[in-house]
Image: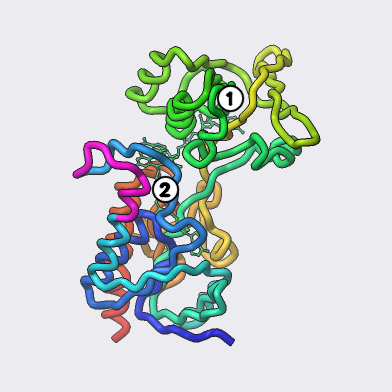
Amino acid sequence: MGETKHTKVLIIGSGPAGYTAGVYASRAMLEPILVQGIEPGGQLTTTTEVENYPGFTEVQGPDLMIKMQEHAQAMGCEIIGDIITELDTSRRPFVAKGDSGTTYTADAVILATGARAKWLGMESEEKFKGFGVSACATCDGFFYRGQEIVVIGGGNTAVEEALFLTNFASKVTLIHRRDELRAEKILQDRLFKNEKIETLWFHELEEVIGTESPLGVTGVKVKHTKTGEINEIPCAGVFVAIGHAPATELVKDVLETHNGGYVKVEAGSTRTSIPGIFAAGDLTDHVYRQAVTSAGMGCMAALDAEKFLAEQE
Ligand code: FAD
Ligand code: NAP
């Protein structure tokens, strides 16, 4: 039987939303507990340069997240390395179970569980995951020195991954299903100027092909989205960068969601459909999905939680 810890505010998640909520809730003397989850620091720990977080012309994603953690800690937020596996929202105090065996009880909960990489969902992708198929260039790019790589997707993540991978790869092919990228113009400029990158428009991944023993990728079959023509591209690595889905496992059956599963909050607030449960960051935002907007919502969630708790007293 593990220990039980009580807090006025339990913050679940350690991305920009969670840590900012930690700063504000601590300064409101709510003595918050923040549980970090499987990815301490969140999505920004999987990238390199961040150039659009105010105050930093350029900062490495993992460094920025360490600074945020230190900031929350310095304000008095208790930060715990644990994963919440269950959240009972049917009674107050709310009860969260940690993977460590610890039970957390809380008068208010701030959900800041963010988003996770999406996969294409094909059998061959699953088969070669970790053996040539990846969703994180900063984690795995190094393994492809001097080799050819493909990146799937057309958003900021795909373009950034493609650019980053040119540090290692001899050639990067960006495969996109349309002929227009969603990525910011500044990133597109860098992409088109990079001689190591070729862009293949109107194509989708059909199959990852490779060897059985050892398990490894040797190429991909791609299909033209208009003509249906299939071609093969030799490569040693496939980086899937087709976006992220909100991490709603803990609450998808109890909280109202919308726009493909994002937690719904009352306009202009972080209040969810259950009083005392607040949501911030990518978990609730299908539009902006930025570090700075997530941090902003983390602040709002702490202020909303403070007001809620004051009203209860
Ligand atoms: P996340 O950063 O997704 O963090 C979620 C947190 O929740 C994690 O700590 C995780 O461990 C935790 N968690 C999840 N489930 C549980 C659980 N059950 N129990 C406990 N904890 C849990 N944005 C920018 O503004 N600028 C950029 O340059 C930029 N670059 C990016 C590059 C990449 C490769 C990616 C993927 C995203 C990038 N973004 C960028 C977007 C930005 O990272 C996100 O908008 C931001 O991180 C969202 O913050 P968040 O706090 O909502 O959640
Ligand atoms: P995204 O903007 O949702 O882009 C996903 C891309 O993948 C789109 O181009 C989409 O194609 C493509 N795609 C989706 N499903 C596909 C499928 N099944 N097959 C083939 N292609 C598919 O996701 P993201 O690039 O991960 O960005 C997520 C958020 O994080 C965004 O808000 C972004 O601004 C932010 N972010 C910011 C930065 C930065 O500021 N530097 C860096 C990274 C991420 P279509 O275009 O045809 O839909």
What type is the residue that disc 1 sits on?
Val
- 156 up-or-down from 2: above or below: above
- Specify whether 82 is left or right of 209: left
What type is the residue that disc 2 sits on?
Thr
Residue 57 part of the magenta-drawn span: yes
- Specify whether 244 is left or right of 221: left
Q: Position of residue 265 (x, y in %)?
A: 41, 58
Q: Which residues are magenta?
A: 55-66
Mark 1 beta carbon near ligand 2 (under 8 Å): no
Q: Is residue 123 visible?
A: yes
> Upstream in the sequence, badge 1 or badge 2?
2
Mark 2 beta carbon near ligand 1 (under 8 Å): no
Mark 1 crowdedness (10 Å alpha carbons): few <14, some 14-19, many ≥20: many
Q: Secondary structure at mark 2?
A: helix
Question: Which quadrant is home to the C terminus?
Answer: bottom left
Q: Nearer the viewer, residue 246 or 85?
A: 85
Q: Nearer the viewer, residue 198 or 21?
A: 198
Q: Secondary structure at mark 1?
A: strand
From the image, tell me which residue sits under label 1: 150
Q: Nearer the viewer, residue 107 or 19?
A: 19
Q: Position of residue 71 (x, y in %)?
A: 25, 62
Residue at far left of view: 55
Q: Is residue 300 visible?
A: no
**Residue 45: mark in rendering:** 2
